[in-house]
């Protein structure tokens, strides 16, 4: 079952601490399949999408 926890927009320390605690529990063997943080830019205008002019090949790192 998916779960999430919301944090105030200025409380990055608490959000990072929560994610770190989950990763530690996962490393200790608890079944936690996917841990991620996401945010929404409230100042964004328009439909969210990838930039059309972005050329990924120009920005990839040589291995």
Image (cartoon, rainbow, N blue to C red):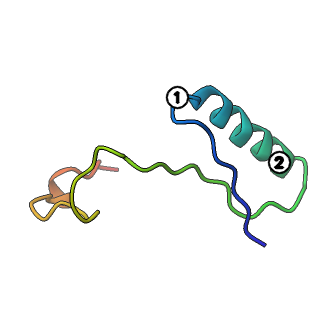
49 or 45, which lies in front?
Answer: 45
Q: Residues within 10 Å of mark 2 (few under 14, many from 20)?
A: few
Residue found 21% across the figure and 61% down from its top = 46
Circle 2 SS class: helix
Residue 27: x and y in percent read 83, 48
Q: Is residue 49 left or right of residue 30?
A: left
Residue 42: x and y in percent read 36, 46
Residue found 90% across the figure and 47% down from its top = 28
Which of the labelled discs sits on residue 52, or is there none?
A: none
Query: From what the image shows, is residue 11 above or below residue 48?
Result: above
Q: Is residue 60 left or right of residue 9?
A: left
Q: Residue furthest bottom?
A: 1
In which quadrant of the rendered view does residue 3 lie?
bottom right
Residue found 14% across the figure and 58% down from its top = 54
Circle 1 SS class: loop
Which of the marked residues, 1 or 2, is nearer the chain's N terminus? 1
Q: Are marks 1 and 2 in contact (CB under 8 Å)?
A: no
Residue 33: x and y in percent read 74, 64
Q: Residue furthest left?
A: 53
Q: Is residue 31 left or right of residue 59?
A: right
Which of the labelled discs sits on residue 10, or is there none?
A: 1
**C-alpha gap between disc 1 and disc 2:** 28 Å
Residue found 35% across the figure and 50% down from its top = 63
Closer to the camera: disc 1 or disc 2? Answer: 1
Query: From what the image shows, is residue 41 above or below residue 56?
Result: above
Which of the labelled discs sits on residue 27, or is there none?
A: 2
**Rendered-image quadrant of the N terminus:** bottom right
Badge count = 2
Q: Residues within 10 Å of mark 1 (few under 14, many from 20)?
A: few
Residue 47: x and y in percent read 25, 65
């Amino acid at each position: 079952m998916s779960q999430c926890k919301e944090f105030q927009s200025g409380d990055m320390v608490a959000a990072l601490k929560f994610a770190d605690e989950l990763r530690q529990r996962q490393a200790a063997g608890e079944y936690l399949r996917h841990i991620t943080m996401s945010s929404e830019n409230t100042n964004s205008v328009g439909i969210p999408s990838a930039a059309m002019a972005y050329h990924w090949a120009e920005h990839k790192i040589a291995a």
